Amino acid sequence: MEPNRQKLGLVSLALLLVVGAGGLILGRLAQSPAAQVGMVFAGVGFLVAAVSAFQMRLEERERLEKLEFDELSKSASPGSNLFTQQAETFPARRTREQFEKFFVPGFTVLLLAVEVATVVWLWRWLGKLPPAALQKHLLLMAVFGLFALLLFMLGKYVSGIVRLENHRLLRPTAGFLLLNAYLSFLIAATAAAESAEFHRVDLWVARGLCLVLGLIAVETLVGLVLEVYRPRVKGREARLLYDSRLVGLLSQPESLFTTMAHALDYQFGFKVSETWFYQFLQRALAWIILAQLGILMLSTTFVMIDPGEQALLERLGRLVASRPVLGPGLHFKLPWPIDEVHRYRTDQLQRFIVGIVPDEEHEEETVLWSVGHAKEEDNFLVASREPLPQTNEDAGKKIPPVNLLAINVPVQYQITNLIAWAYHHADAGPLLEKLGRREIVRYLVNADINEIMSRRRGQAGEELRQRIQAAANDPQHPLGVRIVFVGLAGIHPPVGVAAAYERVIGAMQESETNVLAAKAHALETNTLAAATAYRKKQEARAEKARLEVSALARAAAFTNQIPAFQAAPGIYATRAYLQTLARSATDARKYVLATTNTHDVLQLNLEDKLRMDLLDVAAPAKK
């Protein structure tokens, strides 16, 4: 029987190799990511089956060696000590033990590294993969359907042998055979979905298979760690490190309890599966699950509507006519999925913004015209009433009387008619946003840019609120909302022309500054000129009066001097000379000679004194 097991292992190995290589080539030709990722499992199964087949060969050699040793022991004499050294007697067993001690853990670590590297590479490859239609999907369905049939038949046969004969070395091979059979059927199903024009199913299946491979890698890592702390029981066979319980569970989901029992027994070192609690749980699990499902279904008959909310009650997809709208409080209904409740915040003010897509990272920053402060910003056409030049001086083109503005318009609304909001339109929220954008565009093309940016901002918000409310109250299909507020939060020129706009505004301010400075200079110079003219007139009048009085005084003095001169001409002339001398010598130095009968030598210092001394101090006057 043992050679048949080895042949079965080799056949499984060959089938996994053929399926993996053929499926990978066909997947690349058909541009199927799911087929290419799925064949990775065939490759991993091939490696595991190869090691398992080699280990079966070692155990077969050990079995033959033991039979040969038993035959020789029977034919040897009773006192013979030919086979006393056990290490030298059983080289095949020693080889098998060394293989399990060193090669199997090393291979498992290498398998873990391959799985992790493959998962990382496949995930990045799938992320960069451009969307493409599946090619040759009919051929893909046929070939992978054939692969699924062959793998399933062989896998069921091998798993039956494993279950009947408890052959642990064939268990990993059987698990990968059945798993690849299911994956081949799944790939064929994705090809069928592609033929039914479900185009992205293949890519999502590939991502799911990548996640499954990642879970297998995690299980391999956990198994290596737990192997270090596993209790060793003498005479008990250890579980193969490369035998994945997750693969066994995926390939044979009906053996969930068996897999769990083997894992617990192997990990704790005793028969956990033979305890009364485990046996009771295994027998009553179905009833426990049914009871939990019943309690879960019963809990769906109660519904609590929070304050500020309203809910729509649907029965089998239709609105319940007797009580379509549920208010706040506790309500009873039929269990799900017969009755369903859809909640809405009817008292809460909801909001949408027209004109920009807000950037949460820059909400707290100061808004500048020349710096972008949103992810996306729309520019609206606004009329201009100011006369513009008829043509562009640079390009010679006619300039239209319009401008561009970037406007941030928050709109707040409240749901007033829940049935109209939920049932009159497929998606009322985006529809209301589009209506608001339409009314804003219509209003701005008839508004003046200077008025909308200054004094008419509040009035514009109220008028927009009325327009959006009128559009939402369409008699044929009303939205059932009340527009609470419409504001013009941010109005500025587009970021691209903000610098030019600022230069224009700066030039206007500079012009106004120059005009005011010229007026101030005119006031200053005119007032100063008038004051100077008045001062000069007054000075001229004073000079005129002084000259007239001086001339009159000289004339009067001359009239009085004539009689005195006629009375004593000599005395009058001498006195006039002396008066002239006194006036002219007022500031001159004078030296008085007290005696006349002496011979003095006079030395005169005609230099001016730079500073005064004691001789220059005048004597105090007598009292």
Image: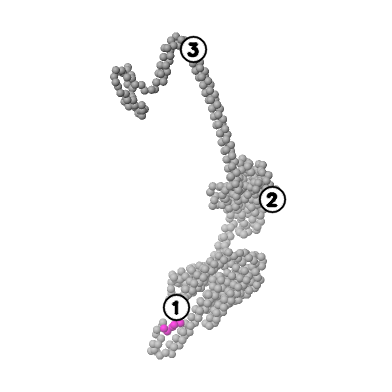
Residue 5 percent location from the top left of the image? 53, 80
Mark 1 = which residue? 98
Task: Pick whichever of labels 2 and 3 is earlier in the sequence.
Answer: 2
Residue 391 showing in the rendered view: yes
Predominant secondary structure, magenta span: helix
Disc 3: which residue: 559
Residue that extends furthest to the left in the rendered view of this protein: 598
Dots 2, 3 in contact, CB < 8 A: no
Residue 587 in percent (x, y) is at 39, 22
Residue 520 — which label? none
Q: Which residue is mark 2?
A: 477
Residue placed at 43% from the left, 74% from the top? Answer: 233
Q: Residue furthest top?
A: 567
Quadrant of the snapshot with the C terminus: top left
The amino acid type of the residue labelled 2 equals: His
Question: Would residue 580 appear left or right of 463 to someone viewing this image?
Answer: left
Q: Which of the two marks, 1 or 3, is nearer to us in this view? A: 3
Look at the numbered disc 2 and give the secondary structure of its residue: loop
Q: Amino acid at mark 3?
A: Thr
Q: Residues within 10 Å of mark 2 (few under 14, many from 20)?
A: few
Residue 119 position, x and y percent, is: 54, 67
Q: Which residues are magenta?
A: 88-96
